Amino acid sequence: MRHGRPGWEGRREVSGQTYDEDGLRFEYPHEWELEVTDQGEVRTVAVQDPDGLGFALITTDESCPDPAEVADSALDAMREEYADLESTATLETINDHAATGHDLEFYAMDMTNAAMIRCFRTPRRTVLAFGQWSDLGPDELADLVRDVIRSIVETE
């Protein structure tokens, strides 16, 4: 399904805004909303499409938990919520960091949804990236969410 909002046609790259705080940087579309939540050693930065059909959550944990365990815990939480969830384990390199994770597909509210979980550890912290999008969004939405996650860079 095509989204009717001007400016989406043919656009794939992340452009517009850069989050760059506390040694973490990533790019996200200029019209997306940003929210930051701190809980001790854990910070979550959420960016979301204004229509709510796609989002990315980037969580950093300075206690440095094991990335595979964090990714599996995120998968378990999704399985609790969506019984019909299908997942595929995956490995990916995100800006020189070996990330473990899962690609997900599931149904919610009569919509097909997909998500990606990626997690890696640096000397300073563990980074968990979770992105989700709906098939009701524009064709480019999945790529925009993926590109937000793939743009993550540790700057300190």
Image (tube, helix red, strand yellow):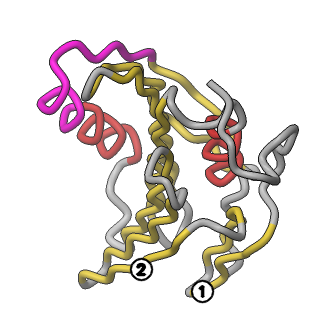
**Label 1 packing within 10 angstroms: few (<14), some (14-19), many (20+):** few
Q: Nearer the viewer, residue 5 or 98?
A: 5
Quarter in which the C terminus is drawn = bottom right
Horizontal and vertical percent for residue 128? Answer: 44, 53
Left/right placement of residue 103 relative to residue 75 reads: right
Horizontal and vertical percent for residue 33? Answer: 53, 71
Q: Secondary structure at mark 1?
A: strand
Q: Which residue appears at 51% of the width and 74% of the height?
A: 34
Inspect the image, locate mark 2, and give the three-letter code of the amino acid beneath it: Val
Instruction: Read off the residue under disc 2.
Output: 36
For the magenta stretch, what is the residue range?
76-88
Inspect the image, locate mark 1, and give the three-letter code of the amino acid beneath it: Glu
Horizontal and vertical percent for residue 126? Answer: 44, 60
Instruction: Give the CA distance from mark 1 to mark 2.
Output: 10 Å
User: What label sits on residue 21 in the rendered view?
Assistant: 1
- In contact (CB < 8 Å): disc 1 and disc 2: yes
96 is higher (above) or lower (below) than 42? above
Horizontal and vertical percent for residue 74? Answer: 28, 41
Left/right placement of residue 119 relative to residue 20 reads: left
The answer to which quarter of the image holds residue 123 is: bottom right
89 is higher (above) or lower (below) than 116? above
Q: Earlier in the sequence, mark 1 or mark 2?
A: 1
Q: Nearer the viewer, residue 133 or 60?
A: 133
Residue 39 shown in magenta: no
Q: Residue furthest front?
A: 4
Q: Which residue appears at 66% of the width and 60% of the height?
A: 152
